[in-house]
Amino acid sequence: MTVELICVGTELLLGNIVNTNAAFLAEQCAALGLSCYYQTVVGDNRERLIQTVQTALSRSDIVLLSGGLGPTKDDLTKEAVAEALGLKLVEDEASRALIAEYFKVRGMEPTENNWKQALIPEGGRAIRNHNGTAPGILVVKGGKRIILMPGPPNELRPMFTEEVAPYLRTLGGDVIASVTVKLTGIGESSAETKVADLMEKQENPTLAPYAKTGEVHFRVTARAKTEEEAAALNAPLVEELKRRFGTAVYTTDEAVTLEKAVVDMLLKKGLTMTVAESCTGGMLAARLVNVSGVSEVFKAGFVTYANEAKRDLIHVKEETLAQFGAVSRETAREMAQGAAEAAAADVAVAITGIAGPDGGTAEKPVGLVYISCYVCGKIDTQEYHFIGSRMKIRESVTAAALTQLRRCLIA
Amino acid sequence: MTVELICVGTELLLGNIVNTNAAFLAEQCAALGLSCYYQTVVGDNRERLIQTVQTALSRSDIVLLSGGLGPTKDDLTKEAVAEALGLKLVEDEASRALIAEYFKVRGMEPTENNWKQALIPEGGRAIRNHNGTAPGILVVKGGKRIILMPGPPNELRPMFTEEVAPYLRTLGGDVIASVTVKLTGIGESSAETKVADLMEKQENPTLAPYAKTGEVHFRVTARAKTEEEAAALNAPLVEELKRRFGTAVYTTDEAVTLEKAVVDMLLKKGLTMTVAESCTGGMLAARLVNVSGVSEVFKAGFVTYANEAKRDLIHVKEETLAQFGAVSRETAREMAQGAAEAAAADVAVAITGIAGPDGGTAEKPVGLVYISCYVCGKIDTQEYHFIGSRMKIRESVTAAALTQLRRCLIA
């Protein structure tokens, strides 16, 4: 079956935002075994939207639209789809009730245009949005399936994963099963080099690499008559990847993130942890707290951005700061040890570095970072050099800290 | 004049990479005053490429293509464009010489397929590529302009900036200037209701709303002969928006984020701040540390996820936790006051709430959050109800905390 993506939004046409929805949906569709030949971006313009939807319907079995479901007059996706299909818009009672509830819970009054979000093309089905007021919509007509989703990624992604993907899976044809082998602590090109022979001869299952910050994911995807058969086709390749990459593989479970893998290791060992963050300024703690149920492991963390904070809160020695500087192996080490003591935790991860764009010197350039892991009395401190924007460096550091801690917990 | 983008590549259709070329080219074209109504992604497939190029030529004055200029059999963009235009491919001598030189300099032998990169549609012009072997190509036919560029961003970007943009500028036409008016503390639909009349009559400048987590941005965009004229057209509408939204407007500077606006207010007042975060677990601190130069204001922060941390690090009373619970107005208040004291800061923001998906009760449901702002002895504590995933709730809370603090600093 073929699928086509239409992303609606003037901000995409103006280049104000990067189209991460298209990449997300394309990746998900590929994993579902759907062939995608076209992606289109079009603005909030009635005529052009109708034309684009009609073209897509003429050449693809499934059309996924994102964006333009907001309450404003600019938001025209639903109207254009209804017109392209020759359908009226009617009010969906359940959606109206959910919108009413959304505002009630917040003690706010909906304005007249909010009710527009409860309209759906006649014969369509609303798809519940747990993260906003715009429901998604599914319409089936003339053997074609059109699915509308809201544009904000934090609404679109869970809606696709929880509601749309399970529906697409029921459409039959061959079944697709995929397994994601997630690696950390290895770069994309070294990882690819290690499996060049497997990439070369891939057919069924296929093998595709995806680079994430500090991680490489390999998706193994097989197509077969039943899910069991597809899973059986995947198994030997997954085993081969695990064999080749060893402990760099942190999970083969799609739902497990790197922070969850680390938290699970700590839970299993019955260890508590804390953090002391300088340049990341809370990002590592925030990633740990992404994990629901982290409270058994993570009780407290320190954002010690200033020297005084490193000294007063986690007892880095004045002399250490004076002699080696805040961004040094010695300071990182004392931060880790001091944080573990101050939080009475078994494990501590300390980060100190220069995220830029200012603050770098010839000796200590932007991107220089020290990460120190204290694990039950043992301390491991590493030096890193990252490149990129302030944000990119900080995200890379956070991923590296999780990777280093994981390595220490394995050792 | 209208422009249309076609990005060629299977890796885009599979979601292996995000289409940053489209965002780059779209932004550049907007700055050149070109109207872009469509972006398409298509794979390395001859028929579909020809069809896509023909459609683009039928509706746009200028077609920019990226990708598919490599030396392999997969790379078909040039062939498809030549066929769509009914032109033969001929060898461009200068390009052949440059390819020979490229390999000579590197001490490498070109393979037979490298010479394919010297072919261009008859009557076309090669565009020099300083960063790779694939030249760009410009073809003018029937009043339409087709420009082909290589796909790798480090080849495409300099080629566009140095060669293509100057050429497009010679085609004349208007320039575009835009101003973004950023609001916080008001929902998208209420914001739009307040400017319904302005949205209604928009023409030049145009007015477009963008919803972000906890924020609404209005983009005002004018088109004129010169940048000065365009800016002059924008000014009255920007002033009107500022008048209507008052202090909800936190900036009209594209580069200023909400966290930067808050940090700038603190800098101006000479105040230092700290945070005490429970459910956000470091997200607020991490947003503040996004701001380069935050060190003058932000010295230290506390992630007090567990009750013990609230008690030991920031001195919330045991009785308060016992009587009202960790998620309560009283605890939030003591967290703010205690954090300010522990960090010797003038300002403290405390957050305690239930981000879910577990941990909610009938009395204290998932999404219930208390935010308390301590500003030089005065404390403001507010109750909020958010919905969505754990991540969505935490992001909303972080934005709300910045908004509440900003309000306290204005008051």
Image (tube, coloured by chain):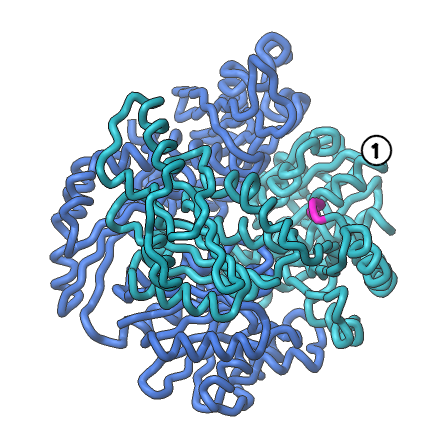
Chain colours: A blue, B cyan
Q: Is residue B250 magenta?
A: no
Element assignment for label 1 = loop
Magenta range: B254-258
Closer to the camera in the image, A22 or B105: B105
Q: Which residue is drawn at 71% across and 60% down?
A: B219
Look at label 1 and name its amino acid: Gly
Q: Which residue is drawn at 74% across and 29% down?
A: B296
* Up/down of A33 relative to B379, above or below: below
Majority SS type along the magenta span: loop
Residue A254, image x and y in percent?
A: 32, 53
Q: In which quarter of the image is the N terminus of chain A?
A: bottom left
Disc 1 residue crowd, few under 14, some 14–19, many 20+, Cα 10 Å: few
Q: Is residue A130 visible?
A: no
Question: In this rendering, would B300 be left or right of B91?
Answer: right
Q: Quadrant of the C terminus of chain A?
A: top left
* Up/down of A376 relative to B268, above or below: above
Residue A343, image x and y in percent?
A: 53, 31
Closer to the camera in the image, A234 or A59: A59
- What residue sits right under mark 1 in the picture? B270
Question: In this rendering, would B396 be left or right of A378?
Answer: right
In the figure, residue B85 lies in which quadrant? bottom left
Which chain does the numbered disc 1 sit on?
A: B
Residue A383, image x and y in percent?
A: 45, 20
